[in-house]
Structures are given as structure tokens and as C-alpha cells.
Image (cartoon, rainbow, N blue to C red):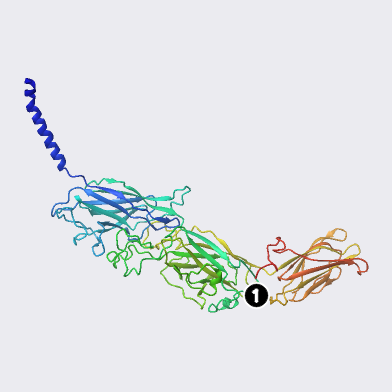
Amino acid sequence: MKYFRNWFPAFAVAALAFGAASTANAQQVAAFSCVGNAGVPPIVRAEGLTELVGDLVLNCTGGTPTVLNGTVPQSNIQIFLNTNVTGRLTSDPLSEALLMIDEPAPGQQRICTGTCGAIGTGALGGVDYKNNSAVSNIYQGRQVGANSLVWLGVPIDPPGTTAVRVLRITNVRANANQLGISNTLIPAQIVMYVSVTGSTAVPINNPQQTVAFVLPGLSFAVKNIKSSYLQCNSFNKDASTDNTKSLASADGWQHILRFREGFASSFKKRASGDPASVYQDTPGAIYNTESGFYSAVTNTSSSSKIGVASAGTRLMARFANVPAGVALYASIYNVASDFSTISSANGQASGYAANLVTTDSAGAGAYSATSATGSDLKAPIALSSGAGYAVWEVTDANPLANQDYYFAIAVSYTAATASNLPGLGTATVAGSFAPLSTVTTASSSAPIPRFADTSSASTLFVVNPCTTNLLFPFLTNQAGFDSGIAISNTSVDPFGTTPQAGPCKLNYYGETTGGGAAPQAQTSATVAAGKQLIAVLSTGGNLGVVATPGFQGYMIAQCSFQYAHGFAFISDVGANRVSEAYLALILDSGIGTRTGFASETLTH
């Protein structure tokens, strides 16, 4: 007991010391720190070079607010992407990417235009960034690397324990195409890393955030009423020489181009309204347009490009190998997918819209709607050496639905086979977003949005020659026999067929008497519509066909008109004892597949 009484004063001193330490700990202020949050990352287009990624938000708490009239500590906020940052440079190195403090509403927004500090107020929660007119709350980033932006010297007043300081990074654009499309079930991701350094260290929880998922934004297809044309039959003839003429009622539109969204909101209009007066100025709001955040403050004469896209989503069709003499027309609006409505309606499909616009060959340029050249709301597609393009800009879209935009294409030409017009060949078309660009980094001049070319060409139509290829399987002028042939041009008929005319090339395969070589091929004069080429091997025939005495074998006639029919007659010389006849075989599509051409079997 004695010893216990001796220890009691020591216990009292220890208890007093522990109590003092506990009180000091209760009064200690939590350090200033931030938590990163990217909310719900958007889906962006894999073809895109300037895709708008989701905002990164830092919610910051703790620290001690700056004392009255003290200088608010400044920090550098830097972000890095796992791909190139590709936003507009308003004045190199200043970017359209913005840092906003405390979510300033319209009317409270003040952009820093130089070196912008802040003076402490000593109030709970620190500086009032929303209502203090002496403090800027919007800052432009600086491009400091292909994939990095920094905001230098931003005054961030710690809010203490009674408030939250919110830092929002917005208007960051990224090269999604650089990452490509994932080959797994999980989409490729655009990741943002953030660091805050400066006069004081600012710890960040979750400094790495996914700010976008990458998916294909477009699929393209061609739908045809008519996939092939004949050189000798005019099509939409009046419009081929005068673009103010309407398409022929019997011919009309023949092709539909389908641009399909890869995901809802892939197609976007430029902005919510006229960027000169209608702003997208609510921090964190989702507008589903090509433009980002822009306001009366950021859209001044000195910084009018901040956040505002150059155009809405543009859909581009590029044509190649269009045969000479063929004119193409495009519908100036998107149309219904049903071909039966195109020739009579031709107006915009309901619910969303796109207009044909005049652009450069990459699909870039200020919005300029193309005027129609006729009551059927069409416009000619300029062609040079068989190549041309048409571009439509999305002016209305539904971000809550996957949409198909359809555009009609018409073919027009006047047949002039004597001049080999229209030319023969296969026209192709490739569909893509526009403008197309190879600028894959931030730029002060390249358009926004812009896209990589990931398209591939599809066949649009074929112009076939007006030919019939006839096979005469056996002809002979040996062993006392002779053969005659007749080839009729039957393009004169009671069915309204356009008359055709052309020569026939006669090709001989076999031998002559004694094993000699087969005769050389010969070409007749023109076989007029409704007339016949008639010849005998031993003596020749009309239209300049010369004799081929002693020939035995088969013969293929290549006639430059569509409706040729052949007949052969074999008999002994003088036709006194033996005779046989047959019809020549047509080698063309539908009856045979040897030539690839279409004869009477083609649908007109």
C-alpha cells in the first residue's frame, strides 16, 4: 500500500498528459486533399480524332482557408491521356480545355485572361469563387505534350471542413482512333491521369479515371434497285445534259446509301442552337452535340473558338471509277428507306435530318447548304476523272435511339455507243464520317470534329456493253458439207425496246482442210436493228463477211448489240441429201456465266 501511494502522483501526471494530447488531436485540421471522379464516361467514336471525353471532377476538402488578405496558394493541375489530346488551340499553346472552380452557373462565370491570383477572405469555406467578382473561376489549359495539358498557377483556396471545393476539367478532346477497337468483350478505354502540384502538396484519391469508351461509330451499306446499266440504253436522259430537269418517272432514283449509327448519340448536330446566342454553359450538363462547354464568357471575340465545333456530324460518300459520260445526283435531304416513296416524296425523313452541304474534298468547310436543281430536290455530284463526293451534315438527331440516315443517288446518261459513251466499268462508293483528316494532334486550324478514314469501297453499279455472245458449236466446210449462219438483230419488236445496232466479230476455232490453221477472226459491218447477218462458209455473205473455205470447228460471234439470236444450217453441198439446223447458244448472264455480261435476261 505504501508503494501504491508513492506511485499515485505519477499516475496523475500521466493522465493529465494523455488528456492534453487527446485535446490537441481533436483540434487538428484534416489535410487538404481531393477525390477524383469521372462520373459516367461517354461512348466515343473509334473513327474520331477529336472526340469529346467525359469531364473529370475533383472534390476537395480539408485544409485551412486563407487568412484575410492573405495570398491564396497556387497550384499546377496537369492531366495526361493514354492517347493524344486533340482539342483546338485558341492561341498556341492555349487550349479550349477548361478548368472550372465550384461549378459557376451562367452569370457567375469569369475566365482568367492572364495571371490570375486570389486574396483570402478568412471566411468559413474560403474564397467564394461563385460570387466574388474579383476572382476568376474558369481557366484555359496549356498544351504541354502530345497527350498532356496543364493549368498553371491556379489559386485554390482550401475550403476547410465546412465546404467542398470542386474542380471540373472539361472540353478535353482525344484521338480515339489512335487506340483502335478492342478485340475483347470490353471496349477500349480513354484514361485520364491527374496531378496537382505547386506551393503545397495536394493528395488525390483515385487520380486515374476512365473518361470514355471507344466503339465504332458508323456502318455503311448500299441498297440498289438497279445494279447494272447498259451502254446502249439512255437513263434519266434529260437530266444528263440539264441538271434542272427532273429525273424521268420511269427511271428516277436507283440507289440508297445507308449510314447507320454504331451507337446512340454517334450522330450529333453542331450545337444546341446558334453559338452566337444560345450557349452550352451549365457545368456538367450533357448536350449530345459536337460542341462542348461554351458561354458568353468563353465565346468573346478574343476566344470565340472555345468549345464550339466547326460543324455537326458529317456523312460523306466518295465515288470512284464512275464511267465517262455518267452524271450522278444526290438527294439534298435524308430520305425514307422505302424506295417506293423516293420518287414522289424526296423530302426529309421525319424525326431527324441532314442536309447536303458544299465542302472541300475532305468534307471540311463552313456550313453551306447545297441548293436543289429541280423539283425533285436533287443536286449534281461534281465528278473529275470518274471521282467525286457528296457530304451531308446532321442538323437534327435523337441521342436516345440508334438511327439510320438514308440518302438517294441517281444515275443519268445519254447513250452514244458510237463514241463509246457512257464508258464501261464498275463505279464504287465508300461511306465515312467527315471531315477526313490526318491531323492527329492538337491544332489551331484543323476542323472539329475530324475523323480518320476507315472506309472501304463497295460496288455502286456497273455499266455493261450492249452485247450478245453467240456460240455456234459446230460448223463445217469439209467432206462434201457446207454450213451457213444467220444472226438476227431483234431489237425491233412490239415491246417498245430501244433499237440497237452494231457489228459482229466472228471468231473461228478449229482447223481447215488438211490440218491447216483456223481462219483469222473477222468483223462484219454494222447489223442494223431488225436486220440479219447471213453468210456461208464456202462463199462468204453480206455485211462484208468473207468466205472461210475448208473450215471445220466452232465459232463464237461477239455482237455489239443486246438482242442477237443465231441460227446455223449444215448440209451436203447443194443440200440434196442431208441437212441439219440448230439455234446458237447465248453465252451471257442468265443463260451462261462465261462472259459475265447480261443480254436479254437483264431486268430493265
The answer to whether one can see residue 362 in this image is no
Does residue 528 appear left or right of residue 234 in this picture?
right
Q: Is residue 102 above or below residue 241?
A: above
Query: What residue lies at 19% left-to-right and 57% top-to-bottom?
Result: 128
Q: Is residue 339 above or below residue 12?
A: below
Question: Type of residue at label 1?
Answer: Ala
Q: Position of residue 313 (x, y in %)?
A: 43, 64
- Front position in the image: 52 or 349: 349
Instruction: Give the residue at the far right of this rendering.
Output: 577
The answer to whether one can see residue 582 in this image is yes
- Front position in the image: 265 or 197: 265
Does residue 226 appear left or right of residue 287 in this picture?
right
Query: What residue lies at 86% left-to-right and 68% top-to-bottom?
Result: 538
Residue 507 sits in which quadrant? Answer: bottom right
Q: Quadrant of the N terminus?
A: top left
- Front position in the image: 583 or 285: 285
Q: Quadrant of the C terminus?
A: bottom right
Q: Is residue 167 above or below residue 378?
A: above
Label 1 packing within 10 angstroms: few (<14), some (14-19), many (20+): some
Does residue 467 appear left or right of residue 354 in this picture?
right
Q: Position of residue 306 (x, y in %)?
A: 32, 63
Instruction: Give the residue at the far front of this rendering.
Output: 1
Instruction: Give the residue at the far top of this rendering.
Output: 2
Q: Position of residue 423 (x, y in %)?
A: 63, 69
Q: Position of residue 430 (x, y in %)?
A: 53, 62
Q: How many marks?
A: 1
- Front position in the image: 241 or 244: 244
Residue labelled with disc 1: 416
Does residue 39 appear left or right of residue 545 in this picture?
left
Residue 437 sits in which quadrant? Answer: bottom left
Indicate the secondary structure of the residue bearing disc 1: loop
Residue 21 sits in which quadrant? Answer: top left
